[in-house]
Image (cartoon, grey):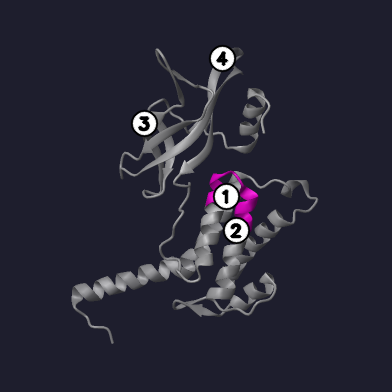
Amino acid sequence: MLANKEEQIAYIKENYPEVTDSRINDAYWDIFCEKCKIVRGFDVIRKDYARETTLSGYITDWDAPRIIYFCCPVCDMYKMWLVFSFSEVVEIDGKRKQIKKFYKITSIPAEGLEDIKELPEDPPSLRIAYRQAIRAIDANAHIAAAAMFRRALQVITRDILGIPAGSLSTELKATVGNEYNGVKLTKSFSDNAYIVKEAGNQGAHPDSDPDLLDFTPQDAEDLQNIFMELVSELFVIPEAIKKAKDDFMGRRKINPK
């Protein structure tokens, strides 16, 4: 519960990411496009504000969150952000100026690649764990994201690769030399998986090292990239190779053996 506006502002600043640097102006924001795989200037196509109806019309509640609709100018995909904005007085070049700062509460859909179509449908726990990790990152809950990436990794080792249950460290060592989707797993796979495991452990069981007490947005982004390397090796690349072969054989009218 919040006692006043000051507590509300302090809570938002502490718990949600500031996105002021992404804002170019009222009409454009620099945002990563999941389809184009690049950061570019998205068009602001709509803004919705909280308003109170009065006898003379309506009053905009500038202290309430607003919804901003963004559209990629190249692929026309769009997304929505729920944001708060606050005016602050800062000193720039020796002069005090009032600027607006923006904080993102959530994104619809979630930031990042929320669905990987190449992931196996069975067991469903893999897709669930991965989506929870992405949504945790979007909610600024980076420690929770680390724990869910670790959970997704364990589903892969036990339920997909068929490694006998034990400690996750032992399971990862046992993956080396196994084959899945025609891919022979190497020590590189095991080493990347080890990083995901250790990061998840740090989130669940933090030690006294002050450098490890905080899990930053950059940490979460880097961990997601490492996890994506594992997923690509196991699922994405083999599926792409299979599709390329099938397409070629279809065009060349080559019947499979």
Where is residue 128? Give x, y as percent: 52, 61
**Along the line of sight, the residue nearer the viewer: 229 or 82:** 82
Q: Tag 3: residue type? A: Arg
Label 1: which secondary element: helix
* 106 with respect to 169 (left or right): left
Point out the stretch of residues depicted in magenta. Answer: 135-149
**Residue 106 location in percent, x, y?**
51, 40
| Inter-mark Cα distance, 4 to 1 | 35 Å
Q: Is residue 255 magenta?
A: no
- Label 3: element kind: strand
Per the image, label 4 sits on a secondary structure element best described as strand
- Identity, as a three-letter code, of the amino acid under mark 4: Lys
Q: Position of residue 76 (x, y in %)?
A: 31, 42
Q: Main secondary structure of the magenta part?
A: helix
Q: Which mark is residue 97?
A: 4
Quote the CA–CA distance across marks 2 and 4. Answer: 42 Å
Residue at mark 1: 136
Please tell me the numbered disc located at residue 46: 3
Query: In this view, which residue lies farthest toward the front?
Result: 55
Task: Give amino acid for label 1.
Answer: Ala
